[in-house]
Image: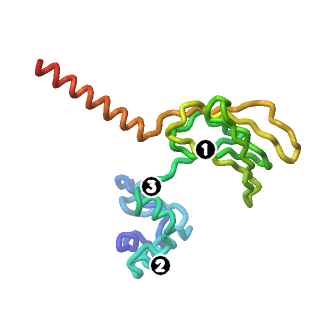
Amino acid sequence: MRALENFSQGIGLIPEQIWDGPDLAARHLRFGGATNAAVPLLWAHSEYVRLHRSAADGRVFDLVEPAYEQYVWRTGEHKNIEIWKLNRQVQTVPAGTLLRIQASSPFLLHWTGDEWQHSTDTRSQPTALDIDFVDIRVTQQLQAPIRFTFLWLEENRWEGKDYEVEVHASKVEIEQSNDMLRKSEAHGKRTSTVA
């Protein structure tokens, strides 16, 4: 907080930008001084107030608990989700991902994960944003691509085209495979050295 206060000018206005390069006297720029950008824009002032409040509370006062729990407190990892839309047709997803199929009108998703040996029909769920979606859990065991088509419910019309999303090994599986390969290579080097 003292550093912010030390950057303030005149009547205590905190500049939005601080010059962090060598002094340029001809341009009136000095290390640690303002860059002559607009003052005050109040962003720096609001950060200063938030910092004071957090220091007084002994914790970050505007902490978003669910985000903190998801990304910091528990594992530091997030759940993989990939969104497929007609204007953003992802080609591949890693196993273990949640594949969300979105559209701007209600639909029935006719899909398979085993080359149409079996199929599933899943009705889309609406949102308050007028976006409908279906979630497909891409399991670790899934080997075939996910193939799907749409039945547009308001028009009672099939899309007339199949879409495909390839499934590749998850990050964990890739890391495990790489670890096994490294161990195998290390073992091979030891064996050849000993022999």
Q: Residue sitting at 50 percent across and 40 percent down? A: 140
Q: Residue sitting at 67 percent across and 34 percent down? A: 118
Label 3 vs label 2, nearer the camera: 2
The residues bearing labels 3 and 1 have C-alpha atoms spaced at a distance of 54 Å
Q: Is residue 165 left or right of residue 153?
A: left
Residue under label 2, please give it.
11
* Foreground residue among 134 and 56: 134
Residue under label 1, please give it.
99
Amino acid type of the residue tagged 1 in the rendering: Leu
Q: With respect to residue 81, does 175 lie above or below?
A: above
Mark 1 surroundings: few (<14), some (14-19) or many (≥20) residues within 10 A: many
Whether label 3 touches label 2, CB < 8 Å: no
Q: Position of residue 150 (x, y in %)?
A: 77, 39
* Foreground residue among 43 and 150: 150
* Foreground residue among 69 and 122: 122
- Earlier in the chain: of badge 2 and badge 1, it is 2
The residues bearing labels 2 and 1 have C-alpha atoms spaced at a distance of 54 Å
Whether label 3 touches label 1, CB < 8 Å: no
Query: Which structural element holds mark 3?
Result: helix
Query: Which structural element holds mark 1?
Result: strand
Residue under label 3, please give it.
27
Quadrant for the C terminus, please. top left
Q: Is residue 125 left or right of residue 40?
A: right
Quadrant for the N terminus, please. bottom left
Amino acid type of the residue tagged 2 in the rendering: Ile
Mark 2 surroundings: few (<14), some (14-19) or many (≥20) residues within 10 A: few
Q: Residue sitting at 37 percent across and 62 percent down? A: 32
